[in-house]
Each structure stands twice: as C-alpha cells, then as structure tokens.
Amino acid sequence: MGLRAKIRQNAAPLLAAGEQIQAVIPAQLGQPGPWAGLSHKLVLIATDHRILVCEGAWLKRSVVGKLLHELPRDTEIGPAHGYWGYEYHVPDRPSTPIWIPRQFFKDIARADQMRLSATPS
C-alpha cells in the first residue's frame, strides 16, 4: 500500500459521515534544511467539504494525528511552484509557512481542481 493510500486510511476517523477525501498532502512546518528531518510534520487532507490540517509523525509520514486547523473547502492551496518544494501560508495564519515537497505538487493541483466541484459545508 502506497503512502497516499495509508494516509487516506489513517485519516478516516477524522471525517464526517459521507465526507470523501479528494487529496492528501504531506507537509512540514518551515523550510527544509539540515534539520528538516526534525521539523514538525503535518498532513493536509482535502475533502469534498473542507481542508484539514493535521499533525503528522516525525518518523512515519503516513500517520495522521489530531486535527490542528480546519479551512473552508474553497481555499486554494496552489499553484505550487519551486524547485525543491512549495511554501504555503495558511490564510488566517500567514506567519506560519508550511513547506510541501515537490513530489506532492500533483496532489496540490488535484486538490485545487477538485475544490471547484466541492460540496459546500
């Protein structure tokens, strides 16, 4: 089972009845660097009703911890750009950048594309 499928499985308890996951995006607080492995890990989960920002695990990227923040589904995450990754700022917390690795750019694009067809909550 791949990383995205494991995250979807682990995120299931956080979903409301009938809510469907559209994209999962592993991330971390701050920029990458020599100590990036020690940074606070996060998981963004885009559903058809909302975007969840959850705690991740330091060593296992597939772990979905407690819910930290909830965003309206019409929130745009991208467009992602950058050679190594993309720095996303949560709209109501602009001083806390979330860094998303380049390998998840397609997940950002999918989440943004799916937001247009999302069900209002």
Image (tube, helix red, strand yellow):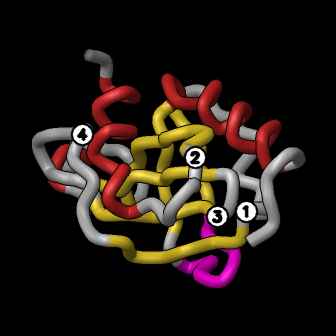
Q: Report how far apart the C-alphas of labels 2 and 3 lie in the structure.
A: 10 Å
Labels 3 and 4: the sequence-earlier one = 3
| SS class, disc 1 | loop
Labels 1 and 4: the sequence-earlier one = 4
Residue 91 in magenta stretch: yes
Labels 2 and 3: the sequence-earlier one = 2
Name the residue at 19% across, 44% down. Answer: 37
Kindly indicate whether the residue at mark 1 contacts the one at mark 3 (C-beta within 8 angstroms).
yes
Q: Residues within 10 Å of mark 2 (few under 14, many from 20)?
A: some
Q: Residue furthest left?
A: 59
Labels 3 and 1: the sequence-earlier one = 3
Q: For the residues carrying marks 2 and 3, which lies nearer the camera in this image?
A: 2
Name the residue at 51% across, 61% down. Answer: 17
Residue 114 lies, in percent from the top left, at 78, 40
Instruction: Tell me where the magenta segment starts and ends, as one range.
Output: 89-95
The label on residue 50 is 3
| SS class, disc 3 | strand
